[in-house]
């Protein structure tokens, strides 16, 4: 497994693979890889001939008061995870490699980016869509793998690919959790022991909402109110949002009539964590 830092090197390698008629899968990440990322890489390895993992902490998707500078980074550990999952190539560009000083082209979306994280992180999805489009153009994969953990991001990427006619199959992969329920996240590393315990309130709320829906509750208000109540009983938790939306359009819905996404964002101390479940009637 090779690690390359330039666009030219990725293009040369992928060109070679495509000449051999091989199918290329891409797993875009920001690094500090855990079992969640590993599950995406393994899925790509099982479905594609060659798997490229991009590791790039993309400054464009962080707001001015967010954690770009402190976001955890550990390339050596990431290389070990990628190798053990069977990846073929790591693309680890610098910010300068990805963004020329006079860079001024963006992929911006409406609708699907309006609710949930789009409300509290207004420039986030513009950064995500721009960097993912760039990675798609650089790597030209046949398939790209994204986690259900970032459910709105998955819906946004699916829509972007459809709207802009990108010839790439988007594969959504299930959320990987710690044994006690907490969704795995690179940001869990910010939590101290007490916060780590308090963070369990996210998955508890998700499991509560999910079981209410499974037991026949159809009202978004009843489900999200119960989840909100549970979260507010944890003194270290501060709710950003608890919302039910259509799974694909990310428009708010009051009742479960088709596939819905129930998503939450909660601050534990200063760390903002997200979790969700999808329910299909
Ligand atoms: P990130 O490095 O946080 O940008 O995540 C890169 C990819 O890994 C995204 O598609 C995420 O949705 C996915 N991912 C992150 N955490 C998990 C998890 N716990 N389970 C499944 N996928 C995940």
Image (tube, grey):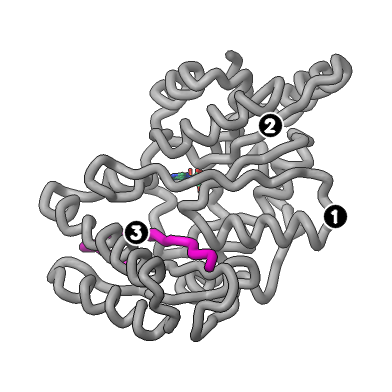
Q: Pointer 2: what residue?
A: 25
- Relative vertical location of residue 1 with respect to residue 215 in this rendering, above or below: above
Pointer 1 residue Cβ closer than 8 Å to ligand 1 = no
Helix, strand or loop at mark 3: strand
Picture residue at 55% right of the left edge, 48% below the top: 58
For the residue pair 89 and 20, the one nearer the viewer reads as 20
Residue 178 place in picture, x, y as percent: 29, 42
Q: Is residue 247 visible?
A: yes
Q: Pointer 3: what residue?
A: 273
For the residue pair 109 and 9, the one nearer the viewer reads as 109
Picture residue at 40% right of the left edge, 66% below the top: 214
State the CA–CA distance, disc 3 to disc 2.
28 Å
Q: Magenta stretch containing residue 165, yes or no?
A: no
Picture residue at 16% right of the left edge, 66% below the top: 236
State the CA–CA distance, disc 3 to disc 1.
32 Å
Q: Quadrant of the N terminus?
A: top right
Helix, strand or loop at mark 2: strand
Q: Earlier in the sequence, mark 2 or mark 1?
A: 2
Few, some or many residues within 10 Å of mark 3 (<14, 14–19, 20+): some
Magenta highlight range: 266-281
Residue 146 place in picture, x, y as percent: 58, 45
Q: Pointer 1: what residue?
A: 165
Residue with the most extreme front position = 216
């Amino acid at each position: 497994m090779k690690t390359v830092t330039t666009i030219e090197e990725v293009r040369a390698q992928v060109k070679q693979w495509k000449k051999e008629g091989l199918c290329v899968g891409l797993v875009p990440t920001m690094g500090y890889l855990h079992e969640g990322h590993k599950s995406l890489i393994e899925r790509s390895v099982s479905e594609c001939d060659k798997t490229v993992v991009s590791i790039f902490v993309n400054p464009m998707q962080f707001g001015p008061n967010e954690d770009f500078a402190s976001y955890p980074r550990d390339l050596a550990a990431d290389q070990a995870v990628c190798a053990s999952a069977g990846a073929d190539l790591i693309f680890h560009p610098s910010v300068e490699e990805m963004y020329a000083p006079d860079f001024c082209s963006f992929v911006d979306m409406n609708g699907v980016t309006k609710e949930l994280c789009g409300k509290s992180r207004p420039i986030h999805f513009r950064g995500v869509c721009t960097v993912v489009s760039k990675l798609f153009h650089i790597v030209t994969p046949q398939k790209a793998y994204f986690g259900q953990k970032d459910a709105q991001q998955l819906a946004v990427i699916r829509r972007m690919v459809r709207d802009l006619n990108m010839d790439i199959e988007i594969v959504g992969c299930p959320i990987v959790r710690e044994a006690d329920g907490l969704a795995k996240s690179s940001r869990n590393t910010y939590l101290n022991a007490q916060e780590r315990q308090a963070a369990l309130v996210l998955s508890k709320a998700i499991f509560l909402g999910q079981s209410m829906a499974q037991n026949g509750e159809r009202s978004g208000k009843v489900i999200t109110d119960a989840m909100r109540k549970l979260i507010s009983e944890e003194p270290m938790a501060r709710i950003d949002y608890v919302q039910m939306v259509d799974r694909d359009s990310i428009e708010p819905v009051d009742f479960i009539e088709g596939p819905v996404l129930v998503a939450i964002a909660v601050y534990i101390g200063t760390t903002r964590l997200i979790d969700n479940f999808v329910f299909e009637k």
